[in-house]
Amino acid sequence: MKYMFITISLLLLAVAPFFGQMEISLSKINNITSIDYKLFWDLRIPRVITAFFTGALLGLSGLIFQSLFRNPMSTPFTLGVASGATLGTAFAIVFGFISFVALFGFLGALLTIIILFALTSKLKTYETSSLLLVGIALSFFYSASLMILFYLSDETQSYEIIRFTMGSLDVVGLTHTIPVVVASILLLFMSLGYKKEIKLLLTSYDNAFLKGIEVQKTNTVLLISVSIAIGVAVSITGPIGFVGLIIPHILRIIYKKSADKLLIQTFFYSGIFLVFCDLISRKLGTASDVPIGVITSFLGGPFFIYLLIRKRK
């Protein structure tokens, strides 16, 4: 079964660049002067690479959040981190800091993490209810702030902001793809390096402390790493929700393993999942591609409700 999933996933990656609004001729993709060549190598290949590594980054980020907070519904999306990165990116667009959108996206994500830590420490708990409520409150605040930026923006800036809020994988060349690839790979190596710590944190903070883990330092390093990665991804693709919620839970059911043993699987299959969602967005028969964030939210919303019901039971 495991090898069948891997085979299907690799086949999906191989065929994904050949699907889209325009048909591509296999005989012309190596002809530099043809439109098929430019379409395939400048648009389709970078898009698939961006989709895979963005999905991998989001899935792994969700797994890390769920492990640190021991909360099955914690993701950068539900806790407001992605919304903070989006607001930072929108701020950069409106006020003319276009060259620093990745930096502002990161700062928005990092600010959200700091607020979450500050508020939960006041509440003396890292439990589910506190974190989710704080995340929801922050998301509403960020949404209101985003509306203000809409009113301050011109037509071009408004379009750019809308693109980010709905999520988009429209990239040209590898200029915007490389930062996502680097951020996702670094996050993977960081999580693998902290594999032992993640395993102990899954039990309790007290147990991890007794085993010699510096809990506060570990939490800080991992959460800042996730913030950097999310900030980079959101500044390029916009917020794409629920990837970090759906894939880690499905993999736990299939593999029946704890989070520390599913880091690589989550990275790989989350990337495959977003490539698959991107294929759906391009093949719905609409005049243009459906924003990728719409597809993942459409799938993730019911899954989130399922988790709530399952947890209550």
Image (tube, helix red, strand yellow):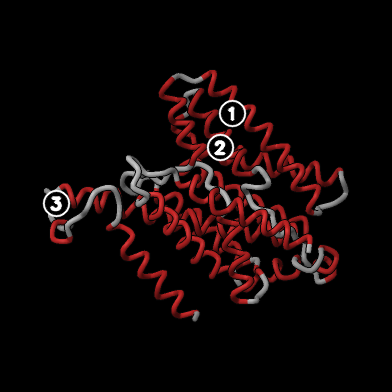
Identify the secondary structure beneath mark 3. loop
Instruction: Name the residue that disc number 2 marks.
Output: 86
| Three-letter code, disc 2 | Thr
| Three-letter code, disc 1 | Leu
Q: Nearer the viewer, mark 3 or mark 1?
A: 1
Residue 232 seen anywhere in this rendered image of the structure: no
10 Å crowding of disc 1: few (<14), some (14-19), many (20+): many
Marked residue nearer the N-terminal end (2 or 1)? 2
CB-based contact (under 8 Å), mark 3 and mark 1? no
Residue toward you, 181 or 313:
313
| Quarter location, residue 263 | bottom right
| Three-letter code, disc 3 | Ile
CB-based contact (under 8 Å), mark 2 and mark 1? yes
Instruction: Name the residue that disc number 3 marks.
Output: 32
Judged left or right of residue 118, residue 190 is left
User: What x and y, as percent, mark residue 244?
Assistant: 59, 56
Spatial distance from mark 2 to mark 1, Cα to Cα? 9 Å
Identify the secondary structure beneath mark 2. helix
Mark sitting on residue 146: 1
